[in-house]
Image: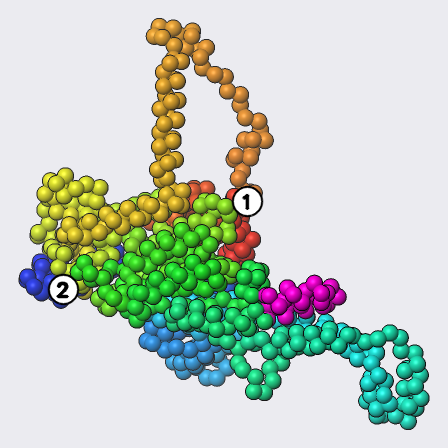
Amino acid sequence: MAQASMPLARPTDTPDAPEAGSAPEAVALRPALFARYGALEQLRYDFPLVLVEDDGDGPVLQPLTQVMDAIVRQTAAPGPAGEALRQLVLRLEDAIRQRVAGGESDTLANLCRTCAADLLAASQEPPFGPTATNLDRAREALHVDGLVIDCDGATPKAVLAHAWKSVHAAKAKEFRKKIDGLILRLTDILKADFTRSDEAHTPAALESAIGASYGAAFDFHALSRVLSRGRAGEGLPKERERRIHWVLFVLRSQRFYGPGRSSERKPGQPEPHGFIFESCAAALDAFRERLPAVLEFVKALTIAELEIENKYRAELHDPVFERFDESDLSAEQLALLPASLVCLRDGRTDTAETVQAFEALASGLSIKVLIQTDDILGGTSPEPSRTAFGVGSARLAAMAMGLNSAYVFQASSAHLCRARERLIAGLRHDGPALFCVFSGAVETAPHVAPYLLAAAATESRAFPTFSYDPSAGPDWAARFDLTGNPQLTADWPLHRLEYQDQAMQRHGEEVAFSYIDFAACDRRYARFCQPGAEAEWGEDMVPASACLESTPEANGGRRPYVLTVGPDDELRRTVVDEKIIEAARRCNDAWRRLQELGGINNSHALRLLARERAVWEAEREREAPPPGAPEAAASAVPTVEPPAEAEVAEVAEPAAAGDGPWIEVSRCTTCNECTQINNRIFVYNDDMQAEIVDPDAGTYREMVEAAESCQVSIIHPGQPRNPDEPNLEDLIARAESFN
């Protein structure tokens, strides 16, 4: 969750506890940590997001901040000389962000043009002045374009559809290259046969081939007689010629992708098939309807490859292709065809669709299913809504992982950009894939921005980020990825909260951000939350996160609370009901199961470690010398040889000198971005400025993501310390602009 320096929260002067029956409307509660966020449109974070239009080689998603930072690095001179341009680009970015937050939808190039004109008009400078010159330089350095979107209810589908189109375009490019090559080579076979035919040697055909301008220089009748006498052999068998013509017709008329250079679409020819659907039933029906065309195309493709190699034998292959059906389709052949994308949305799709979604995933077809969840809490009634997926999407994700062939990806809208590599990997996966995305656009929490609520869902473990890639390796360690969640080894992330009291004295404490904080945002759960003023605070109150490991009886009557703020940003201790505490326990249990799948706090490993430790301690006690035998004790101490110099150097120098990560500490703004990603690598010093204390306490990916998230670009990742870390080539390329 993005962090920013905002006004401190203050304890309230008077109680805000509403009267019975009016709790949901009385106070719009938010977690106290949200007091740092006033207006998101004034902060630099992952949104607005640019849906980049390119040829598929670059990133399909880029935060506006990264695009503008790249412009600054490319155009602004270092030091004071480039400060005017840097400030102008930041103002341009702010103007774009304000427009997008206001609901305007347009491409980045158009927004830059419009906002640049506004800035120029506001400067009141004459044409071709310094502002106009700097704006022109900034716009010339803009090398990406695409629709700019904010984080709202439309974000998951917009992102998935855009990423799918990018993957589809890259796949179409490879498809056309293959099919056009086959068409050209088959056409060459027919052309070569035509040149040996009687028709090609007629005077009219020869004159047409040579051209009318040279007609006076040739006797085409004499040339025809000579060529006819010198022609050797017979042409293609009529059966083979008909077969090649049929193959060419099928390859040129396919409707799975748009036509290529060798298969131009003829007037009146049907448009290519669509592959984006609103239901799994529609996607499966479309597959069944198009199956005859798929079989015909695959048959033509196979025959084309045989004919080009002159390996087609009618007596052998004709019976095979006469019996050819869907059971003969190979995974490699199906991988050539486009994947279908099904977009399902909470509140607009019947929950029965989840059953059909599982059937689609179990079919093994290349169907990508997006389940957009807008409400993961659900109502307080035990009966679920008929049009709400809720936590059902998490159950479907667990079921899909059990299929072993389906790619599974889960993330909130706030983390889609940071997890874009895993999202693209799922779309490229040859088999089925499930994408569960929480949008944050909850109608029952209108006082919290969708981005904040989506980020809070991940932060509170209510909707963790993870992926399962069945093609990544043979075991869970290779397939399951839990990175992207804050403070992976902890039950709940801890954050520093600073506030001032009635006497204007500054205070600070570490608070856990749990499922309870997330639930407190929802007005449906307001009746289970009792906010209390400072005057009502007592010794019998205890942070709710401390009560989750014990039963209500073991708590000894202590009242569990979370720190919240209202519309006035004044601090409250909000006592929560056991109903929310119990839901938080279930959430924590689910998170611990995910941790085990990710190899964190694995119960089997911990039990084995405890057993081996007990055996080791028992053996040490048996081998220990009896009291009063110092010589025996001394002789029992093993002699340890000092490590070789090369080994010492290898341990002491995990990275090449000068290639290690570093931070421009003096420029740190205490934005918490890096500590959110890994608070063991990045730690605040006494001046509340980030330092790198242990570069080996995390991954190079986390180092690069911290550099990309830093609001002032002061983190320099250096070179990777672990040469075996996955995707190093891509990570090094991403880190290059920060080193």
Q: Is residue 619 above or below residue 92?
A: above
| Location of residue 452 in the rendering, given as x and y in whole percent from the top left corner | 30, 62
Q: In this view, does 448 lie above or below 186?
A: above
Magenta residues, dominant SS class: helix
Q: Is residue 634 above or below residue 74?
A: above
Q: Can residue 729 be seen in this view?
A: yes
Q: Which corner quadrant of the image does residue 371 belong to?
A: bottom left
In terms of depth relative to the viewer, which is nearer, 296 or 638?
A: 296
**Amino acid at circle 1:** Pro
The residue wearing badge 1 is: 723
In terms of depth relative to the viewer, which is nearer, 523 or 27?
A: 523
Q: Is residue 449 visible?
A: no
| Location of residue 197 in the rendering, given as x and y in whole percent from the top left corner | 82, 81
**Amino acid at circle 2:** Pro
Residue count near mark 1 (Cα–Cα under 10 Å), binned few <14, some 14–19, many ≥20: few
The residue wearing badge 2 is: 24
316 inside magenta stretch = yes
| Location of residue 35 in the rendering, given as x and y in whole percent from the top left corner | 24, 59
Badge 2 marks a residue whose secondary structure is: helix
The magenta region covers 297-324
**Which residue is at the far left?**
19
User: What is the C-alpha distance between the residues marked 1 and 2?
Assistant: 54 Å
Q: Foreground mark, 1 or 2? A: 2
Quarter of the image where the N terminus is located: bottom left
Q: Which residue is drawn at 17% across and 60% down?
A: 381
Residue count near mark 2 (Cα–Cα under 10 Å), binned few <14, some 14–19, many ≥20: some
On the rendered structure, is 381 left or right of 257?
A: left
